[in-house]
């Protein structure tokens, strides 16, 4: 946080010197301003997303500004280290998702920004058309990491992660993580680009390059461990 204060102080001094005292820090460069769904991510986006995890009302306000269809889920504990808190039930993002997803609002906020500012621009870049639907393997599952009988709980155990398996383009073509990640061509380039773009919006972004368990999907989460593989 200290680096933010230093940068803002310098920016404020420069602005006052240039424009006098009638100057307001733009929301996009103000760490205390809310996130805006339509605004492209910048150097403060990660900080603002992290803050949403402890500000459920602000998170719901952001989600209400999106085209997503969702409803809040009452907090519940479903087992040792499992349950949902500050979660929403998603029927649809900006595109079709098939089966509804239960996820924390913080994951939903990251996914909403990724979908708008990474997924769809990259689809236009590589295919000249948008994505019309997302295929997924779910979000909530009361289990340990990698399904092990021992060890720590997975972020899925608290609906703080989502697994994406593929994407269907506007013309019906399907891009599959399992099939297309390692094959030369635009589909692989697209998948690598959207995975890399997720690293700036989630704390965890795992794919086929991480291990065999992720050979057929992307795992995105808002857990405490920063990893991009």
Image: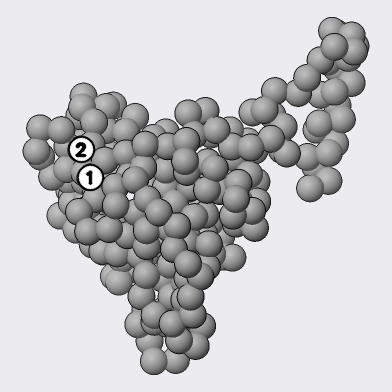
- Farthest-out residue, bottom: 149
Direction from residue 174 to residue 152 in the image, left or right: right
Quarter of the figure with the C terminus: bottom left
Residue 37 seen anywhere in this rendered image of the structure: yes
Q: Residues within 10 Å of mark 1 (few under 14, many from 20)?
A: some
Circles 2 and 1, Cβ within 8 Å, touching? The answer is yes
Query: Which of the labelled discs sits on residue 18, or is there none?
Result: none
- Farthest-out residue, top: 19
Direction from residue 70 to residue 33 in the image, left or right: right
173 relative to 211, above or below: above
Q: Residue 117, image x and y in percent?
A: 42, 33
First in sequence: mark 2 vs mark 1: 1
Q: Residues within 10 Å of mark 2 (few under 14, many from 20)?
A: some
Residue sitting nearer the eye, 86 or 221: 86
Foreground label between 2 and 1: 1
- Farthest-out residue, left: 172
Direction from residue 26 to residue 71 in the image, left or right: left
Q: Residue 223, image x and y in percent?
A: 54, 64
Q: Residue at x 40, y 54 (%)?
A: 71
Q: Residue at x 60, y 50 (%)?
A: 57
Q: Residue at x 9, y 38 (%)?
A: 172
Residue 207 seen anywhere in this rendered image of the structure: no
Q: Residue 136, image x and y in percent?
A: 25, 58
| Residue that badge 1 annotates | 96
Query: Which of the labelled discs sits on residue 132, or is there none?
Result: 2
Direction from residue 38 to residue 116 in the image, left or right: left
Q: What secondary structure is found at the residue carrying circle 1?
A: loop
Q: Residue at x 85, y 17 (%)?
A: 14
Residue sitting nearer the eye, 135 or 210: 135
């Amino acid at each position: 946080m200290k680096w933010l204060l230093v940068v803002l102080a310098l920016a404020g001094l420069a602005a006052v010197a240039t424009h006098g005292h009638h100057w307001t820090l733009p929301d996009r460069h103000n760490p205390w301003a809310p996130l805006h769904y339509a605004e492209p991510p910048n150097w403060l986006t990660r900080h603002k997303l992290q803050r949403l995890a402890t500000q459920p009302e602000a998170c719901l306000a952001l989600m209400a500004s999106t085209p997503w269809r969702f409803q809040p889920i009452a907090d519940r504990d479903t087992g040792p280290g499992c349950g949902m808190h500050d979660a929403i039930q998603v029927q649809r993002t900006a595109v079709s998702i098939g089966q509804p997803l239960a996820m924390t609002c913080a994951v939903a906020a990251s996914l909403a920004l990724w979908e708008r500012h990474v997924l769809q621009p990259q689809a236009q870049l590589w295919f000249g058309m948008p994505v019309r639907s997302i295929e997924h393997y779910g979000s909530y599952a009361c289990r340990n990491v990698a399904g092990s009988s021992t060890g720590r709980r997975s972020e899925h155990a608290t609906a703080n992660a989502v697994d994406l398996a593929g994407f269907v383009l506007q013309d019906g073509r399907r891009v599959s993580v399992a099939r297309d990640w390692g094959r030369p061509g635009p589909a692989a380039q697209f998948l690598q680009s959207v995975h890399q773009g997720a690293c700036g919006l989630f704390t965890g972004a795992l794919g086929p390059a991480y291990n065999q368990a992720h050979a057929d999907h992307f795992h995105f989460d808002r857990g405490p461990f920063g990893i991009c593989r």
